[in-house]
Amino acid sequence: MMQDLTELLSGNPYPGRGIALGRSADGKRAAVVYFIMGRSENSRNRVFEETEDGIRTKAFDESKMTDPSLIIYHPVRMVGRELVVTNGDQTDTVVEGLKRGQSFEEALRTRQFEPDSPNWTPRISGLLAPDGSYKLSILKSADPEGSGCERQTFEYPGLPGVGHFISTYETDGDPLPSFRGEPRRIALGNETAGELARKVWTALNADNKVSLFVRTVELSGGKTDTVIINKHQEG
């Protein structure tokens, strides 16, 4: 069943961090969405900043940063024409693995969920290929004690008008419940990066949303259109 991404998000106060990959309805462009949310002051004190090969998170107010270990990283990086997007420093793990000739799955096999008991936040990752096909991965705790890691990877051909969405959490809670099941199948239209970004940003919970990255990629030549929205820098 195809779902609407904005409806999924607007009905969920805290999906945490989310990745959506897919292909426009006309089949000409791939689409990438990545957002972060936060409940603590430390998590909310962030912005996305463009880098040479993607984006990084950084503190909006350096004086208020208390623990950078799990919140400062490069969410998006390019390897040639392949795009890697993740919710943590496993972006670098995948990038370096691909450069060494490893597969997406092989690189992620060296990692597991985040060590933030009792939430054991899953590591979610995506890989977009130049032809519009893509993969999504989640590494999550097998039990409430964090005694083992479940590794799930999903591979998609990149069909026109179809995307898939995955997030770290099902919704808000204490502890936070990890994402369950397969990535949600979502419908994509022919929106520009700006149009898609505005729809997603509006749908995210106003109190908890922090930053959003949206990129469209022309499959014929690789031309990109990128939009970044930071709550701290709106307006």
Image (cartoon, rainbow, N blue to C red):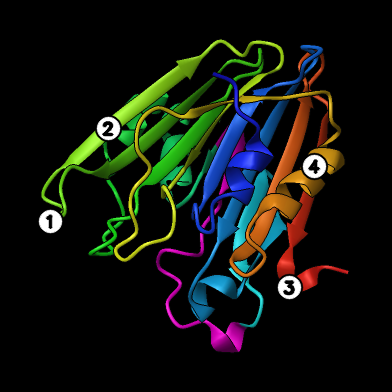
Q: Position of residue 44 (x, y in %)?
A: 57, 72
Which residue: 51% across, 33% down?
126
Q: Please determine whether, in this image, residue 149 is positioned above or below residue 203.
A: above
Cβ atoms at labels 1 and 3 below 8 Å apart: no
Of the two numbered discs 2 and 4 on the same chain, state the one appearing first in sequence.
2
Mark-to-mark CA distance, 1 and 2: 17 Å
Q: Position of residue 152 (x, y in %)?
A: 31, 28
Amino acid carrying mark 4 in the image: Thr
What residue did someone put label 4 on? Answer: 226
Q: Position of residue 36 (x, y in %)?
A: 57, 56
Judged by depth in the image, the label closer to the viewer, 4 or 3, is: 3
Of the two numbered discs 3 and 2 on the same chain, state the one appearing first in sequence.
2
Give the number of the disc on residue 39.
none
What residue did someone put label 3 on? Answer: 232
Q: Please determine whether, in this image, residue 182 is positioned above or below residue 205.
A: above
Cβ atoms at labels 2 and 4 below 8 Å apart: no
Residues rendered magenta in the picture: 62-84
- Residue 196 located left or right of residue 140: right
What residue did someone put label 1 on? Answer: 145
At mark 3, the secondary structure is helix
What residue did someone put label 2 on? Answer: 151
